[in-house]
Amino acid sequence: MTFSGYVKKIEVYVSEEERAELSAGFSAADGRLSETVRSFCFLGSDGRKESFVTACEPAVKLTGVRIVGDRAQDYIFAGTRLFGSGTFRRVRLRLTYDDDSFSDETAVISAYRFEDKAGKPERITVDIRLTAG
């Protein structure tokens, strides 16, 4: 469960067996590793804190414009995933890497739409955080 290596394609399962590529309308991707850091004070540390990374969460942020009619975007921006919580935000993905290997993953998504002036495309952001299952 990782974004390790170069991910060249992200597909979302729009049904149990059918996938749609998450690419249309997206112009930028920013990968990151969110970390949780905990600090502790131990006896004999002369008052200094010691910090430890206690969790890591691979994530990617996609930005672009909304393409109505694109199967992957329509699935991501459906009402239950856009405004829901809990399991409504979980999606199944297939990640294809630069060496053509792939992995099926579960992710939590956060999708945002930013309306602009009339006649301009709606700007969107999709945050994808891989989960343990």
Image (cartoon, rainbow, N blue to C red):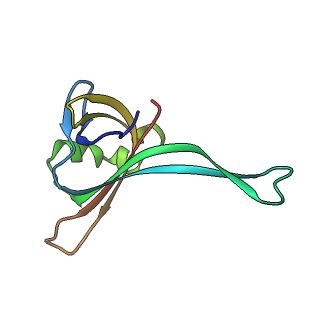
Q: Quadrant of the C terminus?
A: top left
Which is nearer the eye, 19 or 57?
57
- x and y, in percent, of residue 9 in the image: 21, 40
Q: Which residue is found at the position 39% from the left and 38% from the top?
A: 107
Q: Which residue lies furthest to the right in this view?
A: 43
- x and y, in percent, of residue 10 in the image: 25, 40
Q: Residue furthest top?
A: 17
Which is nearer the eye, 116 or 57?
57
Query: Which of the 4 quarters of the picture holds residue 47?
Result: bottom right
Residue 13 visible in the shown view: no
Image vertical order of residue 25 relative to residue 57, above or below:
below
For this view, does 132 lie left or right of residue 75? right
Which is nearer the eye, 74 or 51?
51
- x and y, in percent, of residue 16 in the image: 27, 25
Q: Which residue is found at the position 20% from the left and 31% from the top?
A: 100
Residue 96 visible in the shown view: yes
Q: Which residue is found at the position 40% from the left and 47% from the top?
A: 59
Image vertical order of residue 70 relative to residue 47, above or below:
above
Please state the total of marks drawn on the protein image: 0
Query: Which of the 4 quarters of the picture holds residue 21?
Result: top left
For this view, does 32 lie left or right of residue 76? right
For this view, does 79 lie left or right of residue 98? right
Image vertical order of residue 98 relative to residue 110, above or below:
above
Q: Quadrant of the N terminus?
A: top left
